[in-house]
Amino acid sequence: VEVIKALQTSEEVVQVVRELTVKIGKTPVDVKDSYGFVVNRILIPMINEAIYILGEGVASAEEIDEAMKLGANHPIGPL
């Protein structure tokens, strides 16, 4: 879970969020405040490229997913 401390966020609030994240079985990751989230800024362009590849007829959805699972060690494909 991305934990983002904005300018007016107290350290106490950040610590509570970190503890809650761990309590629900997730791992907190501290990142700086930025538009979008780190994961989304990386994930959305990857999904878009997968759709472009599909649209260009380079590979089927199944082939794209399999390539990403095997080639990038992702647990699931983008499509």
Image (tube, helix red, strand yellow):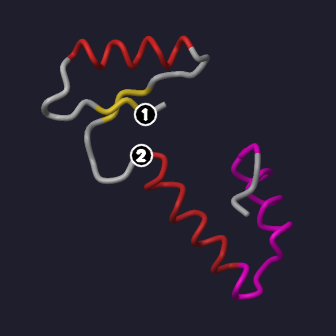
Give the answer, above or below, for where 68 lies relative to 34.
below
Answer with the quarter of the image where residue 59 lies.
bottom right
Residue 35: in magenta span: no
Residue 8 versus residue 72: which sits nearer the camera? 8
Identify the residue position indicated by label 2 in the image: 38
Of the 4 image quadrants, the one containing the C terminus is bottom right
Q: Is residue 77 left or right of residue 1?
A: right
Q: Is residue 44 above or below residue 24?
A: below
Residue 52, position as x, y percentages in the image:
63, 80
At x 36%, y 27%, the residue is: 30
As helix, strand or loop, the secondary structure at mark 2 comes to: helix
Q: Which residue appears at 19% of the width and 26% of the height?
A: 9
Q: Label 1: how many residues lie within 10 Å, few (<14), some (14-19) or many (20+)?
A: some
Was residue 73 drawn as part of the magenta stretch in this picture? yes
As measured in the structure, the alpha-carbon distance from the residue carrying label 2 to the one carrying label 1 is 8 Å
The residue stretch that appears in magenta: 54-75
Q: Quadrant of residue 7?
A: top left
Q: In this rendering, is residue 27 above or below 64? A: above
Q: Which mark is residue 2?
A: 1
Q: Verify CB contact (< 8 Å) between mark 2 and mark 1.
A: yes
Look at label 2 and name its amino acid.
Val
20 with respect to 50 (left or right): left
Tell me residue 71's x, y (percent): 74, 53
Indicate the amino acid at tag 1: Glu
Specify the quadrant of the image occupied by residue 56: bottom right
Q: Position of residue 32 (x, y in %)?
A: 27, 37
Along the viewing direction, whichever of 30 and 67 lies nearer the viewer: 30
- Whichever of labels 2 and 1 marks the residue nearer the N terminus, that label is 1
